[in-house]
Image: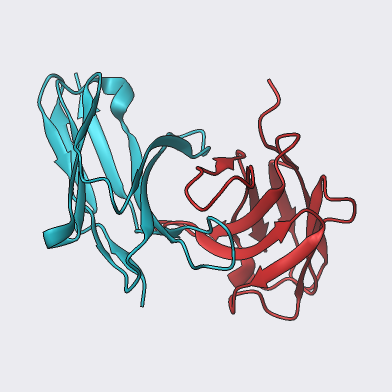
Amino acid sequence: DTGVSQNPRHKITKRGQNVTFRCDPISEHNRLYWYRQTLGQGPEFLTYFQNEAQLEKSRLLSDRFSAERPKGSFSTLEIQRTEQGDSAMYLCASSPSTGGDTEAFFGQGTRLTVV
Amino acid sequence: AQKVTQAQTEISVVEKEDVTLDCVYETRDTTYYLFWYKQPPSGELVFLIRRNSFDEQNEISGRYSWNFQKSTSSFNFTITASQVVDSAVYFCALSEAHHQAGTALIFGKGTTLSVSS
């Protein structure tokens, strides 16, 4: 199965450390999204890529967060100088660029715990 | 402003009961899309249905049915004869056609459904 793959599945880090997550979307999906989900909440949009271009960033994405999709395939999300408030599930999704009404396919997420 | 409200935080039913999950949305767009996703304990969001704003036809898929009413800005989801495997968190979501970010979704807070045997 070539669904959306995220690594690692779990990450525990000390406050102040940098972490990087990887997302491999469904092949041939041009659109890639990052979301963040905290306990008891729905996912919140962070950023969006169309191929390698980062077209939109949410105001939730502080300067400590950076995302890349260098060759329009996999993407990485880096958090610098992690804070306890960054503890959350980070979800990646992809969709084909065939219009605004196509569903996004989600990965299983990376659960980050900052201690 | 766009918003999705799922007023029911938790619902508990016994197997074979019917259950309806409510979703109310707000948008200024005339073209928009509504979605339901299921999130089982494993964490992966599973797509259930998509509806566009011009299609108010209700839909039935097996034990699942959806009622879309633009007049009340609601997109409710009914599970008939619920089963234990239906236990999960269910999210309603909205995307707007004009949104630059493709199909970036605005999610409600989710409804946790617990089905006991």
Q: Residue at x 37, y 59 (%)?
A: B32
Quarter occupied by residue B94:
bottom left
Name the image quarter holding the N terminus of chain B: bottom left
Q: Which colour scheme is used?
A: by chain
Relative to A24, say whether B109 is above or below.
below
Q: Hey, which residue is sitting farthest right in the picture?
A: A71
Which chain gets the cyan colouring? B
Image coordinates of residue B47 in percent, x first then y, are 44, 36
Q: Which residue is drawn at 54% across and 44% down?
A: A104
Name the image quarter holding the C terminus of chain B: top left
Relative to B72, say whether B116 is above or below.
above
Relative side of A78 to A41, left or right: right
Relative side of B21 to B95, left or right: left
Relative side of B57 to A54, left or right: left
Task: Decide which of A27, A81 is in the foreground and name it.
Answer: A27
Relative to A22, say whether B31 is above or below.
below
Which chain gets the red colouring? A
Image coordinates of residue B52 in percent, x first then y, are 34, 49
Task: Decide which of B22, B114 is in the foreground and name it.
Answer: B22
Relative side of A59 to A5, left or right: left
How many numbered circles does the render carry?
A: 0
Q: Which residue is drawn at 72% across and 53% down?
A: A12
Quarter occupied by residue A6:
top right
Image coordinates of residue B9 in percent, x first then y, are 24, 53
Image coordinates of residue A45 in percent, x first then y, are 55, 63
Relative to B78, say whether A48 is above or below.
below
Q: Which residue is drawn at 20% across and 25% down?
A: B116
